[in-house]
Every structure is written in C-alpha cells, then in structure tokens.
Image (spheres, rainbow, N blue to C red):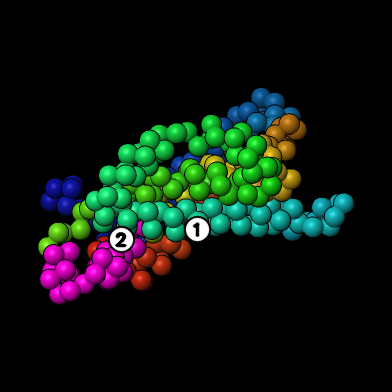
Amino acid sequence: MRLINRRPTSPPLAVVLAALPFVAVAVAYAIGSDIRLAANPQDKLLPAPATILETAIRLFTEGDRRSGDILLWHDTWASLRRLFFGVGIGAIISLVAGVLIGMLPYARRTFSDFVAVLSMVPPLAMLPILFIVFGLGETSKIVLIVVGITPFLIRDLSQRVLDIPHEEIVKAQTLGASSLVIALRVVLPQILPRLIAAVRLSLGSAWLFLIAAEAVAADVGLGYRIFLVRRYLAMDIILTYVIWITLLAFLIDWALKVASRRAFPWLGAGL
C-alpha cells in the first residue's frame, strides 16, 4: 500500500501522532533550558519547566498584594472582551458586505476594488491614527481588530457567494424569489459555514492586533502584562502568559469548529 493511502485509523495512534510535535517542542525547550542553566544558574532567558509551572500556579491562584485580585484572570477577561467584540463586529459587517458584493453587480463594481485596497493597508500602521481618533480606551483596540480582519473576511465571503452555482440562483428566481429571499434562503445558508471557517483563520491576526494595541496603551490585558514585565526579564511570567494565550486561542478555535460541525453538517463545514 502506498504511503499516501495509509491513515491513522486507531484512536490511540492518532492521539500519539498529534502529541508528538508538542512533546518534541517541550523536550527541546527542557534540553535548552538545562544547558543554559548549567552554564549560568542565574540565567533568565530559558527558565526551567518547574519554575514556569510554579509561576503559573502562583499567577492563577494568588491575588495581587495591593488589590487582592488575581491579575491573570482580570487580564484574561479584559482581553477576551475586546477580542469577542472586535471579531463579532467584524464578522457581522463582513457577512452583510460579502453578501451584497457577491450578489449585486452594482455593489461589486462599487466596492470590490475598494475592499481589495483596504486589505493591503497594514492595520498596525493605523494604530496611531486610531488612538488619535478614538482615544486610548477600549474603542480603539476593538476598532483595530475590526479594521484588521474585516477586509479579509469580506473578500473571502464575497468570493464564496460568487462560487455558488448560478443554476441555484436561476431556479430561485424562476420560483418567484426576490433578491432578499434569495439572500436569506439560498446564499446565507451556504456561506455561514464559510464565515465560521474564515473567522477561525482570522483569529491569529485578531490576537496579534489585540496584543499590539494592549502593549501600546492599556492598563489591563494579556498583552499589557507581557510588555509590563519584560523590562524585568521575567521570562517565567511571559512564557506563562504566552502559553495561556495559545491555550485560549486553541479553545476558541475548537469551539467554533464544533459549533460549525453541529450547525452545518453539510458541505464539510466541520472540517
């Protein structure tokens, strides 16, 4: 049997294969940490895994000496609130704009090139402008996420609308469906799975914009805390926050995947 036709059908084997890259990274880090600490026990660049674990337990359980609050949970809530608002607003705008551009030739001729140009603008280059226009509060951080992911989502969704077989649109019109009915009954059910998939793909960028905005102007948040402690070379805290952000991103992506699979079992939506 050719290698291309072999599949890990055994669940234990699939789990082992999925875990291999993570184990390899952990082992490589442990070896690198041991080498650096053996040469210099005071080295802060690669703290020992045990040190990271102790720091993580402390950050998740111990309150701040001044306020008594567990700062990591406050940072997490602040960042997730900004992320959900930014991604949610961007998804709604993209859904409406994508359907209009994909369905209506006049809208496509008017806005497709404009959206294409917007998608080429580096969102982080607009961060100073957003701070000037919207201030240093929550709005500018949310708007940065919206500006960063919306053009990509619009272009993807509008193309998916254009990819819908024209015969389906013709049949709907033959049965007397209006443009609104076609949008709601023909187009929308077919692009909603793609919207979730596109949001999943844009989450990495959304996190990047969020962390960058929090690092520049914030007094709470995961990105703010990372850039606050970097001046002290507190790599155990930084790595704990990075691992926590990665875990949060994975859980959000997994939740969207499960939701897509259950809501849209057709079209391979859950893949």
The one nearer the camera, 115 or 51, is 115
Q: Residues within 10 Å of mark 1 (few under 14, many from 20)?
A: some
Q: Main secondary structure of the magenta part?
A: helix
Residue 92, can we see it?
Answer: yes
Picture residue at 50% right of the left edge, 56% below the top: 89
In the image, is residue 206 above or below residue 186? above
In the image, is residue 144 above or below residue 192? above
Picture residue at 16% right of the left edge, 59% below the top: 165
Q: Residues within 10 Å of mark 2 (few under 14, many from 20)?
A: many
Q: Amino acid at mark 1?
A: Gly
Quadrant in which the C terminus is drawn: bottom left
Q: Amino acid at mark 2?
A: Ile
Circles 2 and 1: CB atoms closer than 8 Å: no
Residue 158, can we see it?
Answer: no
Picture residue at 74% right of the left edge, 53% below the top: 71
The one nearer the camera, 179 or 235, is 179
Looking at the rendering, the stretch of residues picked out in magenta corresponds to: 169-195
- According to the picture, the residue beneath numbered tag 2 turns out to be 191
Q: CA distance from mark 2 to mark 1?
A: 16 Å
Residue 158: % across, % down:
30, 51
In the image, is residue 191 above or below residue 4? below
- According to the picture, the residue beneath numbered tag 1 turns out to be 88
Question: Tag 1 or tag 2, which sits nearer the N-term?
Answer: 1
Q: Secondary structure at mark 1?
A: helix
